[in-house]
Image: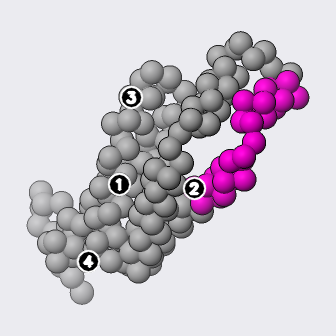
Amino acid sequence: MKPPPAAGNPPIAAAPHPDARRRTLRTIATFEAVKGVVALAAAFGLLGLLHHDLHAIALALIGHIGLDPDAHYPSLLLHYADLLHDANLRKLYTLIAAYIAVRAFESWGLWHERAWGEWLGALSGAIYLPLEFEHFLHRPRLANAAVVAFNLAVVVFLGWQLWRRRRGGA
């Protein structure tokens, strides 16, 4: 039996239960894998639109929904449809493939509790934080706040895991 702490000294916080840690890492791993699968689906969808008039498709979609093509978001859709038509697709697919590969390696490393997976997850999440925070400041919405908070929580959790690992606690 462990003696109670001396008066005035708070008890030392116990390490989290290993199952809770594992579940959290696997939840993050699953989320990262889903992001990779979504990027893969988007790449295949983009590939299917290569030989079509994207501007005409976007206009038809906007008309079908009943939106004004001169409104902000429909005009953005038309703008990016035109940009995509002129884009260097080889570079675009290389970037998409790299993104998918990073997500796959990160999710595998986190699922198997590898330190390099935690490093990759913390660094890749930290890269997006300034951009997400700037977006939130520009458009303060609940969804944008949730994205910033979730990503910050992931980065802090993985950083904490790395710190514990370095101190010999994991």
119 w.r.t. 65: above or below = below
> Quadrant of residue 44 in the image?
bottom right
Q: Which mark is residue 124?
A: 1
Q: Residue furthest bottom?
A: 1
Residue on which disc 2 sits: 39
The local secondary structure at tag 3 comes to helix
- Which comes before the other along the chain, label 3 or label 4? 3
Tell me the quarter of the image containing the N terminus. Answer: bottom left
The amino acid sitting under disc 4 is Ala
Q: Are marks 3 and 1 in contact (CB under 8 Å)?
A: no
Residue 20, horizontal then vertical, whole percent: 44, 72
The amino acid sitting under disc 1 is Ser
Gap between marks 4 and 2 measured at Cα = 33 Å
Gap between marks 3 and 1 measured at Cα = 17 Å
Q: Is residue 149 visible?
A: yes
The amino acid sitting under disc 3 is Glu
Q: Nearer the viewer, mark 1 or mark 4?
A: 1
Residue on which disc 4 sits: 170
Along the line of sight, the residue nearer the viewer: 63 or 49:
49
Gap between marks 1 and 2 measured at Cα = 16 Å
Gap between marks 3 and 4 measured at Cα = 34 Å
Q: Residues within 10 Å of mark 2 (few under 14, many from 20)?
A: some
Residue 155, horizontal then vertical, whole percent: 34, 53
